Image (cartoon, rainbow, N blue to C red):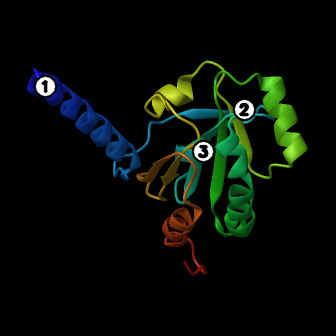
Amino acid sequence: MKRRLALPAILAVAAVIAVSVALLLPSSAPPPETEFTLLDGRKVTLRSLRGRPVLVSFWATTCQPCIEELPDLIRLYNTWHTLGFELIAVAMPYDPPALVQEFAQRRGLPYSVALDVQGKLTTAFGGVPYVPAAFVIAPNGNIVLNSTGRLDSDKARRIIAKYLKGTAS
């Protein structure tokens, strides 16, 4: 009896580990071609950002780890934006647009903030079941880092630095 119960439990744990590892491993596949609607109404596509490293960060105004990583994201953007780095923060569909707008203004977010009211962006990026979640996209358009949970900013810096001229990792 114990053996019959142990096998499904072991398989379930193995499946959870496999999914967790898959979420953390970089993908060399291109990201979905999507259009981001920014708070100011502008539209941006990943195709229009080709040739630059891009960090797409999914977050929520009520997510404590998302809020805790804001200083790292702001520092990253402020340091490297003039060298071609771009950052787009995508608010989750359940975040009311007015709250996102107020939050971004109050926090002085210097990078682009996109709304995902209909959930098209989260769906395009695999559902984004947990926030924060980040995708670093290389200048050639391939995803080179897929991270769930608070971003390892040192690792992200090392990856992004490879694609920027005049930086040291």
Q: What residue would you read off at disc 1?
A: 2
**Which of label 2 and label 1 is nearer to you?**
1
Task: Give the class, few, some or many, for how many residues have Cα within 10 Å of label 3's Cα (few <14, many ≥20).
Answer: many
Element marked by disc 2? loop
Up/down of 167 relative to 100, above or below: below
> Residue 55 in the image: x percent, y percent?
58, 52
Q: What residue would you read off at disc 3?
A: 57
Up/down of 87 relative to 58, above or below: below
- The residue located at (79%, 31%) in the rendering is 100
Element marked by disc 3? strand
Amino acid type at image mark 2: Thr
Total marks shown come to 3
Q: CA distance from mark 3 to mark 2?
A: 15 Å
- The residue located at (13%, 25%) in the rendering is 2
Amino acid type at image mark 3: Ser
Which is nearer the N-term, disc 3 or disc 1?
Answer: 1
**Which of label 3 and label 2 is nearer to you?**
2
The quadrant the N terminus occupies is top left
Front one among 142 and 57: 57
> Residue 90 in the image: x percent, y percent?
64, 37
> Residue 145 in the image: x percent, y percent?
44, 54
Identify the disc placed on residue 123. Answer: none
- The residue located at (48%, 49%) in the rendering is 147
Element marked by disc 1? helix
Task: Give the class, few, some or many, for how many residues have Cα within 10 Å of label 1's Cα (few <14, many ≥20).
Answer: few
Amino acid type at image mark 1: Lys
Task: Give the class, few, some or many, for how many residues have Cα within 10 Å of label 2's Cα (few <14, many ≥20).
Answer: few
Q: Is residue 67 left or right of residue 128?
A: right
Which is nearer the N-term, disc 3 or disc 2?
Answer: 3
Q: What residue would you read off at disc 2?
A: 62
